[in-house]
Image (cartoon, rainbow, N blue to C red):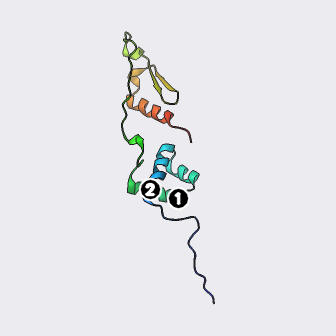
């Protein structure tokens, strides 16, 4: 009986550290869930999870650092806080108008604007 030498699976090879960093950065910038991103890019979700565990979330992504932006106050508020209107303008022509300032947490607005400002894949 003849035995045949087994060949390694085609298309798979070990990632180098730089390749893993690039893949994780692309994952973070995409804003997609890990499994969806892996499917779209042809990666194994398990491979991305392993590297994510080794390198951490959003390795090398600018999203990890806080960024301060200038603000301009255009007038004094004379109405009560519940009647105030705040307009937030962000990158990508995103405009968010808040009519009930007391009811909307600032962290929620920041997360919303951040999510809306991401480039679409």
Quarter occupied by the N terminus: bottom right
Q: Secondary structure at mark 2?
A: helix
Q: Residue furthest top?
A: 78
Q: Position of residue 57 (x, y in %)?
A: 40, 49
Residue 3 lies left or right of residue 71; in this view the side is right
Labels 1, 2: front one: 2
Badge 2: few (under 14), some or many (20 or more) residues near its Cα, within 10 Å? few
Q: Pointer 1: what residue?
A: 44
Front one among 113 and 19: 19
Q: Pointer 2: what residue?
A: 18
Residue occupying image coordinates x 58% and y 51%? 40
Quarter occupied by the C terminus: top right
Q: Position of residue 51 (x, y in %)?
A: 43, 57
Camera sees residue 31: no
Badge 1: few (under 14), some or many (20 or more) residues near its Cα, within 10 Å? some
Q: Secondary structure at mark 1?
A: loop
Residue 103: image quadrant is top left
| Label ID, residue 92 | none
Mark 1 or 2, nearer chain start: 2
Distance between the alpha carbons at the discs numbered 1 and 2? 17 Å
Residue 105 lies left or right of residue 3; in this view the side is left
Residue 103 lies left or right of residue 11; in this view the side is left
Q: Position of residue 59 (x, y in %)?
A: 41, 49
Residue 49 lies, with reference to residue 73, above or below; the image says below
Q: Position of residue 84 (x, y in %)?
A: 41, 15
Residue occupying image coordinates x 40% and y 17%? 82
Residue 13 lies, with reference to residue 96, above or below; the image says below
Query: Residues at badges 1 and 2 in contact (C-beta under 8 Å)?
Result: no
Residue occupying image coordinates x 57% and y 78%? 6
């Amino acid at each position: 009986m003849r035995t045949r030498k087994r060949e390694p699976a085609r298309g798979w090879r070990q990632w180098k550290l730089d390749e893993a960093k690039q893949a994780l950065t692309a994952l973070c910038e995409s804003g997609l869930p890990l499994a969806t991103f892996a499917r779209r890019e042809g990666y194994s979700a398990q491979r991305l999870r392993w590297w994510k565990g080794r390198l951490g979330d959003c390795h090398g992504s600018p999203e990890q650092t806080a960024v301060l932006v200038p603000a301009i106050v255009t007038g004094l508020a004379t109405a009560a806080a519940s009647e105030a209107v705040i307009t937030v303008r962000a990158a990508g022509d995103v405009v968010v108008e808040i009519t009930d300032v007391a009811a909307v947490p600032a962290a929620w607005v920041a997360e919303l604007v951040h999510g809306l400002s991401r480039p679409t894949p």
